[in-house]
Image (spheres, grey):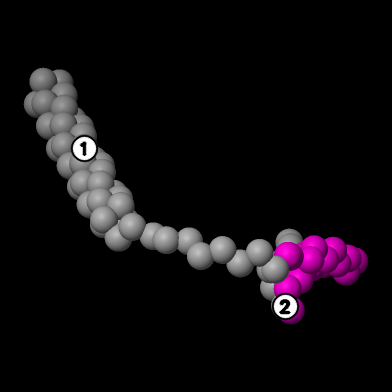
Amino acid sequence: MYKTSFYKNKLVHEEQGKKKSQSTFYINTSKKRKKSVDINILLNRVKVEEKNKIKKQIIFYCSTLFLLFLFGTLIAVFR
């Protein structure tokens, strides 16, 4: 199992277990760019994710109800 940590501009991957091996990657932070974020894009993404979540829940509940109906019908037919 690997453990990853970030310390003093270094990204350190450590393997946990019998053998301890460590690999270090230095991260260049000299090029700090300002990145603008559009709040409308983020809000729209959240709305779309919520709609998709609701659609998945509706599909799950409808399929569950259909299976219960089918199971009940099969029991009634074979009785």
Report if the CB atoms under discs 1 and 2 are less than 8 Å apart: no
Of callouts 1 and 2, the N-terminal one = 2
Q: Is residue 28 left or right of residue 72?
A: right
Asked whether the viewer can see residue 14, the reply is yes
* Residue 15, picture quadrant: bottom right
Please tell me how crowded label 2 is: few (under 14), some (14-19), or many (20+) other residues with Cα within 10 Å. Answer: few
The amino acid sitting under disc 2 is Tyr
Mark toward the viewer: 1 or 2: 2
Q: Is residue 69 left or right of residue 42?
A: left
Q: Is residue 47 left or right of residue 27?
A: left
Residue 49 image point, x, y percent: 29, 49
Please tell me how crowded label 1 is: few (under 14), some (14-19), or many (20+) other residues with Cα within 10 Å. Answer: few
Q: Nearer the viewer, residue 26 or 34?
A: 34
Quadrant for the N terminus, please: bottom right
| 7 is higher (above) or lower (below) than 31 | below
Please give the residue where the numbered disc 2 appears in the rendered image: 7
The label shown at residue 19 is none
Residues shaded magenta: 8-28
Q: Is residue 34 magenta?
A: no
Q: Residue at x 82, y 66 (%)?
A: 24
The label shown at residue 59 is 1
Q: Residue at x 21, y 37 (%)?
A: 59
| 61 is higher (above) or lower (below) than 19 | above
The amino acid sitting under disc 1 is Ile
Residue 68 image point, x, y percent: 17, 36
| Secondary structure type for disc 2 | strand
Cα–Cα span, label 1 and label 2: 46 Å
Q: Residue at x 25, y 47 (%)?
A: 48
| Secondary structure type for disc 1 | helix
Quadrant for the C terminus, please: top left
